[in-house]
Amino acid sequence: VPVIQTFSADGYIVSSDILMFGGLPGVAIRLTPMHGVWERTRRNVMTTTNLAMVYDANTNLLVGFVRSRATGSFNEAGEVEGTVIPEFLGCASPVTCPDPLSPAAAWGPIPGFPRSMTFTSRRLQLAE
């Protein structure tokens, strides 16, 4: 899934992906931009956690939250390679949702998505 992420020096992330506008055939959800945090865990290794709200593509009603947790390593080409685990936390209704930050939140797999995915990211270079 194509994603654009902005990493700040103080550990915050803002992400946009194709699910914001319905970019995958047969996928009936839409996401808000993802907001998250990152940290360096070892030399050349970082972990991230992002959150977004999930909407039904047909009704535009809130159905839950998505969380993606990733671990990536910088390779010799300066790219980041790793694994991301997407998770879903459903809402009982559009106005009754569990706290996505609660340790007791019942996160589970996203229906129709793999439990984990590999990724490769490249840093955007300034044009000369």
Image (tube, grey):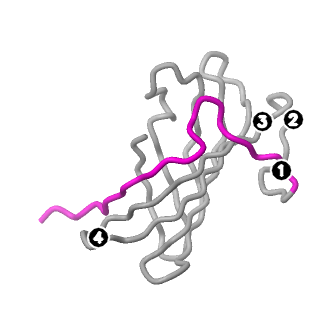
At x 65%, y 29%, the residue is 55
Structural crowding at the residue carrying mark 1, measured as other residues with C-alpha within 10 Å and reported as few (<14), some (14–19) or many (≥20):
few
Q: Nearer the viewer, residue 41 or 63?
A: 41
Q: Position of residue 82 (x, y in %)?
A: 45, 60
Between discs 3 and 1, the one toward the N terminus:
3
Magenta part of the protein: which range?
Answer: 104-128
- Residue at 84 percent across and 59 percent down: it is 103
Mark closer to the chain start, 3 or 4 = 4
Q: Find disc 1 in the rendering and name its residue.
A: 105
Q: Amino acid at mark 1?
A: Ala
Q: For mark 2, give the secondary structure.
A: loop
Q: Which residue is mark 3?
A: 90
Q: Quadrant of residue 35?
A: bottom right
Mark sitting earlier along the chain (1/4):
4
The image's mark for residue 78 is 4
Question: Distance between the Cα atoms at labels 2 and 3?
Answer: 10 Å
Q: Any magenta on residue 46?
A: no
Q: Are marks 2 and 3 in contact (CB under 8 Å)?
A: no
x, y (%) of residue 21?
Answer: 48, 29
Residue 98: give x, y in percent of width and height.
85, 44
